[in-house]
Image (cartoon, rainbow, N blue to C red):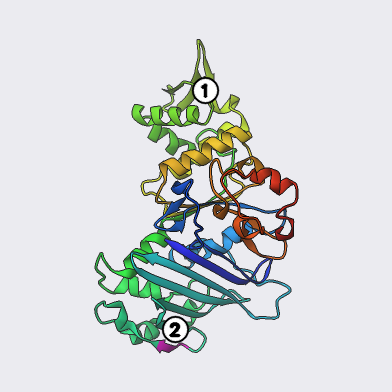
Amino acid sequence: MLINFEVRNYKTFNGSIGIDFSDVCGYKFNQACITNNVLSKVLIYGRNATGKTNLGGAIQDIYYTLFSLNNRRTALLNADTNGEEIFFSYKFKFGDDVLKYEYSRSEADRLLTESLFLNGDIVYKYDFSKRIMLDENLEILREGPILYERFIDSMTDELINLEDTTFLRWIYSNISLTNESHLVSLMDYINRMQFVSVQTDYFYKKDNLIQKRFFEIIENKAELKKFEEFLNAMGVECKLELKKLPDGQHALYFKHNKLVPFFETASSGTKSLVDLYRKIFLTEREPSFLYMDEFDAFYHYEMSEKLLNYMIDNYPNTQIVLTTHNTNLMSNKNLRPDCLMILSRDGRITSLTHATNRELREGHNLEKMYIAGEFQMYE
């Protein structure tokens, strides 16, 4: 699991900002928010323009760096920084072992350095600009022979840009690794990280490929029933029917005495639930990490709470970070003070536990305290 993240000089963040998911406090309630002694269900609050979206983009950078080069989003250097690089640091825990992966990028978005550590000991540090290994202790990985000279020989001018091949990915692609390998666990976790923004407009146009794929799945009656049950669990009381039209296309309906076209009549909130359902709950592999920015922007506060509880109950092993403005969710009813965080305008992330001198207990009304200004100095 991801136990710590830090980024420096990224977009709106001048300096360093990070989240310590290992900062678990001694609360005895809502233990479902903690997995393997790591914060696994987190809500982040912050005023507009504090950087909640950019925070998700920063965490997401590792996925694009290692798995999705062609779709990689440009990492922008903060305009006010005196530095010349954007620095990323990710710390993961698998069993009793901790892997830390770090890299830096230039303003031109070129990789500058890349490092890997195992339990605090350096495995390697590579300098892309000089094409030299600055430090190397690869044998502590307990894998077969890793000849880093071959990696250096494979580097070309064309590769030192957005299409750069990191040493970590080169090892993963070229060395025979066991299923118990630290690197297999690390790369599998990163490959299953998801970053979702919920929308409502995917299904308006007929013959939409996304809509077509969705219909192909729920054509199975069991899948249609699961989708119907999900909507009902969210408070959208309905029965659904999927029909195949004479032209071979499908149409989804609310089932009443007369069939009512689904996407033509559904609310924005219901459509966003469909988008969320297909992005998360129809995936073949359970996400390892899920970041959803303003996840409840289209929802009534009761539906937001239902969705939060649904994810807590159904995804116990997934680390979920949700950003929101909904103070109704700032409650010990669903989460706990160490899982509720504030992103300040000056680039700090502070849990409610550390945002007050009070010893917060289960009976405290956290929303009322927030509105009254108890945590104002951390906004």
Distance between the Cα atoms at labels 1 and 2?
A: 56 Å
Q: Which range is magenta?
A: 131-135
Residue at 65 percent of width and 64 percent of height = 348
Q: Nearer the viewer, residue 108 or 300?
A: 300
Residue at 54 percent of width and 62 percent of height = 59
Query: What's under tag 1, amino acid-wise?
Result: Glu
Q: Quadrant of residue 134?
A: bottom left
Residue 303 appears at what percent x and percent y?
57, 33
Q: How many marks?
A: 2
Residue 169 colored magenta? Answer: no
Residue at 50 percent of width and 35 percent of height = 207
Report the side of 107 relative to 336 (left or right): right
Placement of the C terminus among the 4 image quadrants: bottom right
Q: Which residue is mark 1?
A: 237
Magenta-drawn stretch, dominant element (helix, strand or loop) = strand
Picture layout, residue 85 above or below residue 92: below
Residue 198 appears at what percent x and percent y?
57, 44
Q: Which residue is mark 2?
A: 125
Residue at 36 percent of width and 49 percent of height = 285
Query: What's under tag 2, amino acid-wise?
Result: Lys
Placement of the N terminus among the 4 image quadrants: bottom left
Which label's residue is closer to the chain start, 1 or 2? Answer: 2
Residue 120 appears at what percent x and percent y?
42, 78
Q: Residues within 10 Å of mark 1 (few under 14, many from 20)?
A: few
Q: Disc 2 on helix, strand or loop?
A: strand
Residue 237 appears at what percent x and percent y?
52, 22
